[in-house]
Amino acid sequence: MKLHGIQKMTLLDFPGCVSCTVFLGGCDFRCPFCHNFELIDGTMKATMDEDELIEFLISRKGLLEGVAITGGEPLMHNDLLKLIKRIRDTGYRVKLDTNGYHPDRLKEILDTGLVEYVAMDIKNSPEKYPLTCGVKEVDLDLIYQSISLLMNGDTEYEFRTTVVNELHDEEDFIKIGEMIKGAKRYFLQRFTDRDSVPYGNLTAPSFDKMHKFAEISRRFIPNTELRGVE
C-alpha cells in the first residue's frame, strides 16, 4: 500500500497515546471544508510504502505508542487490514479515522480486535449530508450501520463533526443528536481555513455559537466536548 503522508509525532490524534499519523489517499466524499483535499483528488504523490512505514515504526520504538490511520478514507483500501496487522505486529496500538461509508469493512476490522479506537465523522443532519459531503447522493443507511456498529460494539470510539458557519445551524445539532443519542463521546471541531481547503468563502462559527451547539448536543450526548475552541 502506498502512503501519502506521515506526521511523525502527535499528542492529539490518538487520545491518551503518543502516536504518529499516517495519511492514505482516496475518499468517497468531496467535503468543501476538507483540509486534506490533495489526498482526495489524487494530486498528492505517495511519500512512502508499507515497508518503509514499518521500518520507521521499528526505529521509533520507545518514543511512539500508536499509529493513527486517516485519509482520505482509509476503509476504501482493500488491503487496510493487512496494513493494520503489520502495524500491530510491531507492537503499536492502532486508531482508525473513517467517514462511516463502509460498514462491512468496518465490521470486519472491528471483529479482529486489532483497532483500539475509532473516530467517525458525522458530517451533518440527514437532510444536509449530501451538501456537506459535496456529492449528489449519500446512502444514509451505510452511515447508520456504522453508527450502530460502534455504539453497540466493544471498541472505544468517538463521533465528531467539523462545524462550518455556512453548513450548520442549531436545528442540525438537534437532528445529529437524534442520530447518535447515547453515544459515549462526541466532539465538535471548529472549522479553520487553510490554503488546502478546496472552496473559499467558508468561515468558522463564533465561539458563542460553538458553545451553543455543544449545549444542544449535550441533551442527547452528555459527553459532548469542543475541539479548537478556547
Image (tube, helix red, strand yellow):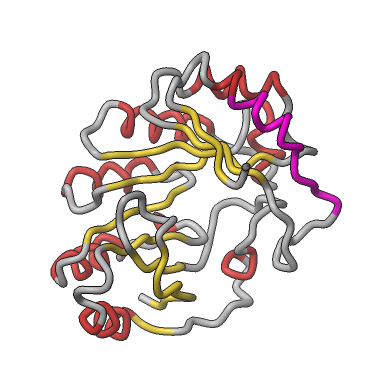
The x and y percentages for residue 104 are 32, 42
- Magenta residues span 201-214
The x and y percentages for residue 147 are 40, 31
The x and y percentages for residue 55 are 25, 85
Residue situated in front as seen by the camera: 95 or 141: 95
Q: Is residue 185 left or right of residue 44?
A: left
Q: Which quarter of the rendered picture does the C terminus lie within?
A: top right
Question: Residue reaching furthest front?
Answer: 230
Q: Is residue 2 left or right of residue 173?
A: left
Q: Name above or below for residue 43 compared with residue 104.
A: below
Q: Name above or below for residue 208 compared with residue 59.
A: above
Q: Is residue 21 magenta?
A: no
Residue 144 figure quarter: top left
Q: Is residue 207 magenta?
A: yes
Q: Is residue 202 left or right of residue 20?
A: right
Q: Name above or below for residue 71 compared with residue 98.
A: below
Q: Residue at x 33, y 28 (%)?
A: 151
Q: Which quarter of the rendered picture does the N terminus lie within?
A: bottom left
Q: Residue at x 28, y 39 (%)?
A: 156
Residue 37 figure quarter: bottom right
Q: Residue at x 79, y 47 (%)?
A: 203
Q: Is residue 82 left or right of residue 102?
A: left
Q: Residue at x 39, y 35 (%)?
A: 146
Residue situated in front as seen by the camera: 190 or 71: 190
The x and y percentages for residue 45 are 55, 82
Residue situated in front as seen by the camera: 13 or 113: 13
Question: Residue reaching furthest right?
Answer: 201
